[in-house]
Amino acid sequence: MTFTLDPIYLTNFVLCIVILVLGCVGYARSEDKSPLFIGIAFALFAASHMVTLWGLQATLTTFLIVIRVIAYALVAVAVYRLAFNR
């Protein structure tokens, strides 16, 4: 396990954390759960980028697939809630 400073994954990780914070702030201000769902989804994406930065993607492939599917599902739920005011 070695940390690889790949600028693409590092940039994606930082941007995911920014979106997580914005999602939490959006939820706190509006009490609408959609921004929170998006923030949580991007926290999961950040975790997948961190796994890749640590060079563990080959051994944790199944884990990465599962958390990315969950993250995309959370984004889909949030978009559905926003589109149909649920």
Image: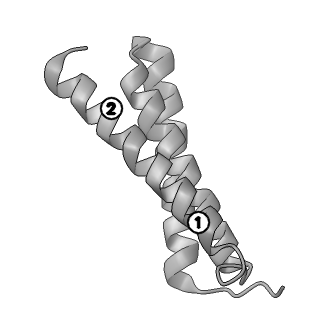
Q: Residue at x 49, y 39 (%)?
A: 39
Kind of residue sitting beneath label 2: Ala
- What residue appears at the point 44 percent right and 11 percent down from the top-left corner? 31
Q: Position of residue 16 (x, y in %)?
A: 51, 55
Q: In the current view of this chain or complex, which residue is farthest to the right?
A: 1
Looking at this view, is 63 or 34 the one in front? 63
Name the spot of residue 32 as percent of width and height, x first.
38, 15
Where does the N terminus fall, quadrant-wise? bottom right
Q: Is residue 33 left or right of residue 28?
A: left
Q: Is residue 56 above or below residue 86?
A: below
Cα separation, mark 1 vs mark 2, equals: 21 Å
Q: Earlier in the sequence, mark 1 or mark 2?
A: 1
Q: Taking 7 as reference, is 27 left or right?
A: left
Residue 64 position by quadrant? bottom right
In the image, which disc is placed on residue 64? 1
Left-right relation of 82 to 61: left
Residue ID at (81%, 88%): 2
- Which of label 1 and label 2 is nearer to you? 1
Binning the other alpha carbons within 10 Å of mark 1 as few (below 14), some (14 to 19) or many (20 upward) gives many
The answer to whether one can see residue 15 in this image is yes
- Residue corresponding to mark 2: 78
Label 1: state its secondary structure. Answer: helix
Name the amino acid type tagged 1: Leu
Q: Give the x, y percent position of residue 54.
A: 74, 78
Q: Nearer the viewer, residue 31 or 66?
A: 66
Instruction: Specify whether residue 17 is in view.
Output: no
Label 2 crowd bin: few (<14), some (14–19), many (20+), radius 10 Å: many
